[in-house]
Amino acid sequence: MEPYDPAAFAKRFPLLVDHPELTYLDSAATTQRLDSVLERLERFYREENSNVHRGTYELAARSTAAYEDARKAVAHYVHAASAEEIVFVRGTTEAINLVASCLSSQSVGPGDRILATAMEHHSNFLPWQRAAAKRKAQFRVCGLTANGELDLEDLERHLAGGRTKFLAVAHVSNVLGTVNPIKKITAVAHGVGALVLVDGARRADSGPIDVADLGCDFYAFSGHKMFAGTGIGVLWGRRALLERMEPYQLGGGMVETMTDDSYGCRSLPEKFEAGTPHIAGALGLHCAVDFLKNFSWDAYDSHRHTVSTYLEPALREIPGLRLLGNPMERAGVYAVHHGTVHGHDLATALATKGICVRAGHHCTQPLHRLLGIAASLRASFSIYNSLEQAKKFVEALRWAIRVLF
Ligand SMILES: Cc1ncc(COP(=O)(O)O)c(C=O)c1O
């Protein structure tokens, strides 16, 4: 196997090329944009700009075809049964809200349960909390082990009794880096008749997804976390479930017929795509998917392992610093908490050295509360980050703590 060369991939990201002074370690917030994505966005607006599913002239036919090709590419990328199971949305947050509001109104009633996990992002927490409250159902939260993995025994305890209708679970935690055993979790949930929505936001920059193998019912992710643009994301859902669901929004593009007092929806997926979609975003996502599909994941996995073998002990050795979580498999996310120096101060100090990291609760207040802290400092790595950058981060962190302590 060829040694992995992150610098070679960094050359595909114009912002990183133009700003060699930056050490970008915030890909869990948003990744950088791929050159082919940027070129595609510009080409669409300059040469092909027209709406989809409306005009009959050539330009419109071309953009409709390109938009639907993007859907097919995404369907192939996630191993969907058909392109009709792919709904383009604004991002993970919108995808989850869509399912929580459209399906729970039919499937959840008083006394039922909706279950999330303590490591969920607010986006996979709040929509379910509200859905449960609206349906007079119970909202429950599954606990974690001391290592920051999902407590599978607690999961089974929560699911026992068969009242749980939905389980909302992250594929990868955006704070602990934990990769959840989705296939196993789904099998347990399906055993008691619960549907499973997987939040794939943090998993999105790590290669093709196989929803058929995972066995889940819905999978949500965002383009901007996988080298494509902002404002475009994907909801994959099982066809039978999507067909059963009410439309999320009403308007142009989603109705087949309408009278003064009634309407009939278009078939999937247009039923869920009211209004003009983010056409250029979908075309950019197509480029990102092509890139990710052909990427050398085995070589990258071994590089990621090298980085984590260096980084985990190096962070743990820093006096007063706690590395959050100790999962069996950590997907490039390293959140730390210092007993005395605040994460925001550390992040500001690191920024003076060109290191881009994020401080705060990372939209996971329940997780931070469980860990007994209000905030943490998070460095998140992606395909363009090198071992040298990991070393620079550790050195800068040692320096910042020394200066600020
Ligand atoms: C695990 C996880 N879920 C959901 C989201 C929300 O994604 P978006 O803001 O793209 O909708 C994020 C974003 O940080 C995330 O990390």
Image: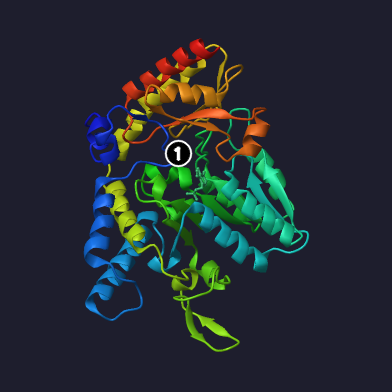
Residue drawn 53% across the image and 72% down it: 243
Residue drawn 55% across the image and 54% down it: 197
**Above or below: residue 403 compared with residue 225:** above
Viewer-side residue, 251 vs 240: 251
The residue that mark 1 highlights is 28
**Above or below: residue 347 compared with residue 33:** above
Q: Classify mark 1 as within 8 Å of ligand 1 or not, answering yes or no.
A: yes
Which quadrant would the C terminus be assigned to in this image?
top right
**Above or below: residue 32 compared with residue 127:** above
SS at circle 1: loop
* 179 lies left or right of 204: right
Whether residue 92 is visible to the viewer of this picture, yes or no, is: yes
Residue drawn 27% across the image and 50% down it: 38
Whether residue 151 is visible to the viewer of this picture, yes or no, is: no
Query: How many tags in the picture?
Result: 1
Where residue 292 appears, as percent x and y from the top left, is 31, 47
Mark 1: amino acid: Ala
Viewer-side residue, 105 vs 184: 105
